[in-house]
Image: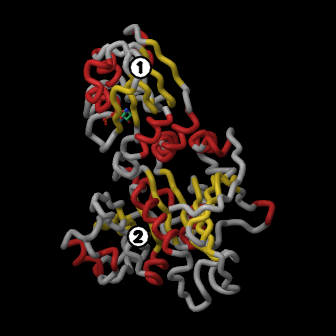
Amino acid sequence: MRRAVALAALGLGRTSPNPVVGCVVLDADGEVAGEGYHRQAGGPHAEVHALRAAGDRARGGTAVVTLEPCSHTGRTGPCAQALVDAGVARVVYAVADPTDQAAGGAEALRAAGVAVEAGLLAAEAERGNEAWLASVRLGRPFVLWKYAATLDGRSAAADGTSRWITGPEARADVHRLRAEADAVLVGSGTLRADDPHLAVRHGADGDVRQPLRVVADTAAATPPGARVLDGAAPTLLAVAPGADTSRLADAVRAGRAEVAEVPRAADGRGLDPRALLAELHARGVRSVLLEGGPTLAGAFWAAGLVDKAVGYLAPALLGAGPAALLDAGIDTVGDALRLDVDDVVRVGADLRLTAYPRRPAAAGRASARSAAPGNSTTERPVTVPATEES
Ligand code: AOF
Ligand code: ZN
């Protein structure tokens, strides 16, 4: 199962709106006969890849899958039936399928005489599929807030400069987060200050799937020359209803950006974060990397819409300049948003801290908790390995 979870992770960022799934088929002697993972939505499911690789050796064997095999005919046939047809004697899966559409695979397998076991390494498999599981349970994309700050919590200096607070290793790590996300989101303030590109750097093999670049651009003020409008990756500009989009017309006409109207927040400041997530969800986005800036992040935290936080902390001090997070609707320390630290590692000269909100969104709180198992059940010690992460 651990191998199946690792296989599933190879699909991160490529399978939306579908889950990441890994599968290992063992032959009747318990030897690995075939492996597979879900590579892209609409393509064969993990079980089908693994069964194909195993061929006749699947007969009398065991299929180990990170997610309950599906029982529906969607874009591909039911995996439960494919497992039965291949003569698999036993199926071990980690996490039950939470969708109405595909659930019921375990029952179908049992009815066909296959031995079925559920829950093996469920916490690890849940973690590996946390974005998709949360999106199914919450009905909106999973939101990962990423920030970089100095040890005194500042993301820019007093003069507004913010480039390269963290080192190259941390920045490379951010590209990994981007590649795993369906969409990368920034506010118009960050766009104006940093003119970020938001695309994923191509690796040596050039095999990279670009996330949707999204700008919360309330007033449609993105300059025509902004780097996000370069066509290197799809771009969505979310604007308030009735905003004057004439500045964006050229980019839209050239197919370098799309514009979507999203309702304003109730307080009139910026767009409604929940409505923005709904717009993205409707476009197939199941995970969002919220990259900044502090105002937009504050609005998401205030709305209880952040599911996970990754902070890159540089061993540097500024003493003045904006904080990594601005107004999140908190006036008194008793109302502080508390998080549970999942892990802390060194990344180059910097620290990377991963944490889950202890009290997630009021709506769907229980679901959000169960989507992040480390958050509730498994307390993990905080360790800071001396070795650098590559
Ligand atoms: C996958 N990959 O490896 C498994 C899935 O859109 P469809 O017809 O491919 O069906 C998608 C559903 O099938 C998905 O939401 C999940 O419930 C189930 N299992 N899906 O994309 C896989 N095993
Ligand atoms: Zn399937």
Q: Residue at x 68, y 75 (%)?
A: 151
Badge 1 is on which residue?
Answer: 62
- Report the Cα–Cα distance between label 2 and label 1: 47 Å
- Secondary structure at badge 2 equals strand
Q: Amino acid at mark 2?
A: Val
- Give x and y (percent) for residue 31: 40, 23
Badge 2 is on which residue?
Answer: 215
Splitting the image into 4 quarters, where does residue 242 fall?
Answer: bottom left
Classify 365 as above or below 76: below
- Give x and y (percent) for residue 331: 75, 68
The answer, for residue 108, to whether it is visible in the render is no
| Mark earlier in primary sequence (2, 1) | 1
Classify 124 as above or below 141: above
Splitting the image into 4 quarters, where does residue 33 fall?
Answer: top left
The answer, for residue 157, to whether it is visible in the render is yes
- Secondary structure at badge 1 equals strand
Task: Name the residue nearer the viewer: 173 or 324.
Answer: 173
